[in-house]
Amino acid sequence: MFKQVFSVCVLCASSASVMAQSADNGWRFQPEFSVGGGYGVTKMKDGDFDEDEAAKKAFALVKFNEYIGVEGAYIDFDEASNDVFTFDPSGTSLALILEAPLTEVFSLYAKGGQLWWDSDARLNTDVANLEEDFDGDDTFWGVGTKFQIAEHLDLRVEYERFNFDIERDEVNVLQSEPLNMDVDYASVNLQYTF
């Protein structure tokens, strides 16, 4: 217990020291708030799922300075299906964004975080037609570029990788294998900064 308290105290002291020094190096606390939305194409990849669909996204972003921010988003994926199973997920995400401004109007960024999703699912066979809801939470990551097109308006082009895991016993005995679906999402987004 003492080691943990001591570690936290050392971390807080060093953080305060770094923040005090960084005020001269451009790492000042300069919060800004942005909202936006986007549209893109998903590629769902699983043994039985292999198709391109569309997806829509709405997001809000808080930047602490020009390098670090936190983004919350809602993503509505289109449904994917195989011969017997239809999967229609949507979810909310929370991600840390690290941005590297290369010029005044262009930057690169990377993000990583957690997606909390749920899905309507239907099992359609000659024997039975079943509907059920599934949910889960999985980590995700992404990379992107940002272009300033007006004083408060940016264009973001990004790629994100999600994963949906559903065990076989959760689906149904009629689905022979668990679903472990990687989803690639490429999107174009408009972001407005207040």
Image (cartoon, rainbow, N blue to C red):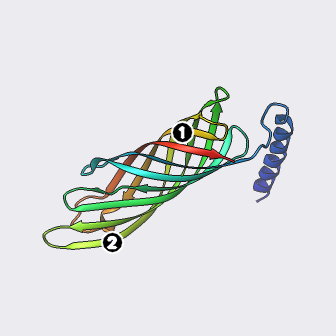
SS assignment at label 1:
strand
Picture quadrant where residue 134 is located: bottom left
Quadrant assignment, res 66: top right
Image coordinates for residue 87, horizontal then vertical, percent: 32, 60
Horizontal side of 97 relative to 13 (left or right) equals: left
Q: Amino acid at mark 1?
A: Arg
Question: Camera-side residue: 11 or 188?
Answer: 188
From the viewer's perspective, tell me whether residue 116 is left or right of residue 83: right
Which residue is the site of mark 2?
132
Residue occupied by mark 1: 156
Quarter of the image where the N terminus is located: bottom right
Crowdedness near tag 1: few (<14), some (14–19) or many (≥20) residues, C-alpha within 10 Å = many
Question: Which amino acid lies under the numbered mark 2 shown in the image of this protein?
Answer: Glu
On the image, the x and y values in percent for residue 42 come to 37, 46
What element does badge 2 sit on? strand
| Distance in Å between CA atoms under marks 2 and 1 | 35 Å
**Residue 98, x across and y down, in percent:** 63, 39
